[in-house]
Image (cartoon, helix red, strand yellow):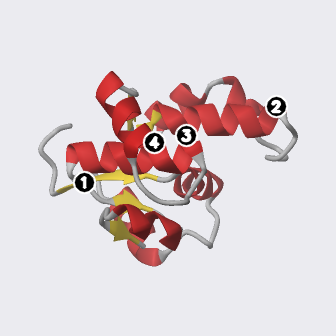
Amino acid sequence: MGGGALTVLLDTHALLWWLAGDERLSLPARNLLADRGTDALVSAASAWEICTKARLGRLPGAAALAADVRAAVLSQGFTPLAISFEHAERAGRLPGEHRDPFDRMIAAQAQALDIPVLSIDAALDAFGIRRIW
């Protein structure tokens, strides 16, 4: 993380929409990601989610991305974020009914690093994280 104006953690859909140039990505999100002063992190959980869903046929057209998510992340100037033991324990201990393991991991990492998540998903708010959209 290079000391930029803001560090954010992308939710998986934000990464997918950025890569696809999808208009569903909010204007504030697009502006943040286009700003080279933003340190944009992408969780290993997103790579896991993309590869899993592509394998199951739930992400049509994502085969090329799933073949090398890390390269796609790096090509955008984003920083891969590994899953640590602390992150795993925190994700497992998060309260609430939200069962998606990818969302739980992203929320845990955002908490541990005290950074906001770039996400449309209001369900993440239950974890007490800051969310930008």
| Residue 44 position within the rendered picture, expressed as x and y whole percent measured from the top left | 48, 31
How crowded pointer 2 is (Cα within 10 Å; few <14, some 14-19, many 20+) is rated as some
Q: Residue furthest bottom?
A: 27
Nearest-to-viewer mark from 2 and 4: 4
* Residue shown at 42% from the left, 67% from the top: 126
Place residue 128 in its image quadrant.
bottom left
Q: Residues within 10 Å of mark 1 (few under 14, many from 20)?
A: some
Look at the numbered discs 2 and 4 and tell me whether their residues touch, using CB distance below 8 Å.
no
User: For the residue marked with disc 1, what is the amino acid?
Assistant: Ile
Instruction: Find disc 2 in the rendering and name its residue.
Output: 55
Res 101 quadrant in image: top right
Q: Amino acid at mark 2?
A: Arg
Q: Nearer the viewer, mark 4 or mark 3?
A: 4
For marks 4 and 1, give the CA distance: 14 Å
Measure the alpha-carbon separation of dots 2 and 3.
Answer: 14 Å
**Which of disc 4 and disc 2 is earlier in sequence?**
2
First in residue order: circle 1 vs circle 2 = 2
Q: Is residue 37 left or right of residue 126?
A: left
For mark 2, give the secondary structure: helix
Q: Quadrant of residue 130?
A: bottom left
Query: According to the image, label 4 marks what residue?
Result: 105
**Residue at the disc numbered 1:** 115
Q: Answer yes or no: is residue 62 visible.
A: yes
122 over 18 or under it: above or below: below
